[in-house]
Amino acid sequence: MIDRFLASLRSALGDDAVLTAPGDRAGYETDLLKARTGRALAILRPRSTDEVAATIRVCVAAGIAVVPQGGNTGFCGGATPPADGSAVVLSTERLNRVRHVDPTGDHMIVEAGVTLADARSEAEKHGKLLALLHGGLSSRIGGNVATNAGGNNVLRYGMARALVLGLEVVLADGQIWNGLRALAKDNAGTDLKQLFIGTEGTLGIVTAVALKLHPMPQSVATALVAVPDPTAALALLARLRADIGEALSAVELIPRTGLDLHFARIIMAREPFDRPYPWQVLVDLTSASRFFDLDGALEAAVGEALTSGDADDAVVASSQAQRAALWALREGLAVAQVETPGNLKNDTSVPAAAIPAFIRGAEAATRAIVPDCVPIPFGHLGDGNIHFNLNPPPGIDPAAFVAHWPELVIAIEDVATGLGGSIAAEHGLGRSKVAAARRVKPALDLELMRRLKTALDPNGTLNPGVML
């Protein structure tokens, strides 16, 4: 049966699009963090939407499940096959064409396998900004849509959902739904594209996306502000929102523990201030108008924060090189934390006003389990998405710390949900958070998710075991 199934796939896609050798499969079977490894029956690499549809039809006929995979850069196992070899991985890497860019209509149409870096670069060639931006530039657009990705610019531009104008989707029965209409206004019935954004390939496979573009920034201002604590950071955020408005693009919270990791990893990196402040806030302003004095606005707002006591010190970038150096602190701490053996990543969000209580509560809860663990709470202050990551205590065997992961994660998630927050802010549920979703989500939420899954994928072909 399996031989006939693979022969049908090779007939539909070509021999080079069906990988079955263990060495060829390996890179598709393990997630980015090397935390989850599965086993695929085969890796399928279709070149077009029609080939994706043909693949699904063959798989449905054979009763074989399909795991869609983009850049394989996720953190929750949503693109990793199950371990029993019962599913194929459908990689979108060959769906990599930019179909159309319309600078006048402020949109572009790209296939699901185009990387985020390439999509942003193509938009820039036409004088436009694709506002989606996060550390995973090698991620693919289809995966960003499937997980409703967030990132650094959510404060101003919203999540991926806010940038999606239309979709092309292969459904679980192999039909192709063409919803690539790049319309700002369309109330002619249910907005069906929303069904496929943030549902992690469980209801359909995104093959192309119409993305909203924005004007390229003509002026930029960046500052790093030292603050005494997260409460003062929130006061700074409120001041910036009131004084600067929509030019406020990013406000990132940076803890001392994260900076210490970065400086230990990059010997040439320099401390931006003359003393090691406990908390810092990275502020980015952008404007499409060349007449807006962003530097003046930022210096005035920061000056008022210094006078009021909401800030202890500040540096405003005076060149692109300085701006890049300030952002390197924020990005560098994330890299340094990931490279620490035994590190634990989390993706929680809470209402912005609850951030100080969340950090205090999570620190107390985790240290009650592992007394000397090292909290590294950082991330997107403006939208409440604080990644409460943890490193092992100094000198402990990382494996001993990893053994505490399950109870540490539950402790952090309980603090977040107790404050009205979420266990999955921007990375999705994948496979790793299914049990957590069952534990914290209302029963009716889960029932409605199951009803949608049953209606659109009655055979359970697409990404079984993910989200539900």
Image: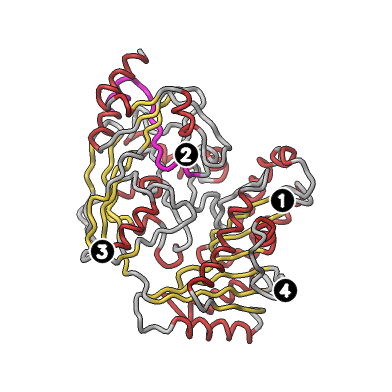
What amino acid is at disc 1? Thr
Horizontally, is 212 left or right of 467 in the view? left
Of residue 281 and residue 437, the one placed in the foreground of this image is: 281
Q: Quadrant of the N terminus?
A: top left
Please tell me how crowded label 1 is: few (under 14), some (14-19), or many (20+) other residues with Cα within 10 Å. Answer: many
How far apart, in angstroms, are the residues tagged by discs 1 and 2?
26 Å
Q: Nearer the viewer, mark 4 or mark 1?
A: 4
Of labels 2 and 4, earlier in sequence is: 2
Give neighbour class at mark 3: few <14, some 14-19, many 20+ (Cα, 10 Å).
Answer: some
Give the residue number, with chain letter if any, for mark 3. 106
Residue 78, numbered label: 2
- Mark 3 and mark 2 in contact (Cβ < 8 Å)? no
319 with respect to 395 (left or right): left
Q: Which mark is residue 366?
A: 1
Q: Secondary structure at mark 4?
A: loop
Residue 191 shows in the view: no
Q: Which residues are magenta?
A: 57-74
N-terminal-most mark, 4 or 3: 3
Percent position of residue 96, x then y:
31, 44
Which amino acid is tagged 3? Asp
Question: How many numbered markers are drawn?
Answer: 4
Asked whether 43 or 203 is in front, the reply is 43
> As displayed, is residue 14 above or below residue 333?
above
Q: Which mark is residue 275?
A: 4
Question: Residue 356 placed where, x, y %?
Answer: 64, 65
- Tell me if residue 70 is in the magenta stretch: yes
Residue at screen point 68% across, 46% down = 408
In primary-sequence order, the first of circles 1 and 2 is 2
Secondary structure beneath label 3:
loop
Please determine whether, in this image, residue 158 is positioned above or below residue 207.
below
Question: Percent x, y for residue 174?
Answer: 26, 32
